[in-house]
Image (spheres, grey):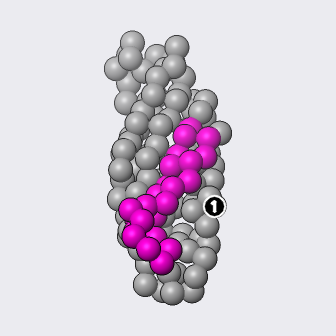
Amino acid sequence: MQYEIVLDRMEFRAFHGCYELERQVGNRFTVDLTVTAELGRVAEEDSVEQAVNYLTVYEIVRVQMRITQRTIERVAANIIDALYAAFPQIVHVRCTVSKLAPPLGGKVAKVSVALEK
């Protein structure tokens, strides 16, 4: 049996971007995650130790958001790779990274990239 953990609209200030100015002044980003994992005996034994701990998931995302990248595609891939490394019971991750108010020369609420593995 499998279960999902969903973390929506985690918001961070970070320095990702293809322009030097973006990497200097930063911007606001959100990350949405859906993590699918094998349930194992988590529910039966009420075992936090066997679960994909969502506090740890948040901390992994926070750490990855601190590593400046030129593309949000790389940011999303790093998050996914770090989650798989931390939790062997994960079977699927969908990660959406959004840059809020991107510098595109007009009013745009956000630009997003979604990766799945």
User: Helix or strand or loop: what does disc 1 sit on?
Assistant: helix
- Above or below residue 54? Residue 69 is below
Question: For residue 116, which quarter of the picture?
Answer: top right
Camera-nearest residue between 54 and 100: 100
Residue 28, given in percent of the width and then of the height, sits at 38, 68
Residue 44 inside the magenta-drawn segment: no
Placement of the C terminus among the 4 image quadrants:
top right
Looking at the image, which residue is at 57% across and 86% down? 20
Q: Nearer the viewer, residue 16 or 108?
A: 108
Relative placement, left or right, of 88 versus 33 is right
Side of 77 where 55 appears, left or right? left
Q: Where in the figure is residue 105, as x and y percent of width and height?
A: 48, 78
- Residue indicated by mark 1: 74
Q: Nearer the viewer, residue 65 or 49?
A: 65
Query: Which image quarter: residue 45?
Result: top left
Bounds of the magenta segment = 93-116
**Residue 66 place in picture, x, y as percent:** 48, 69
The residue under label 1 is which amino acid type?
Arg
> Which residue appears at 40% of the width and 50% of the height?
58
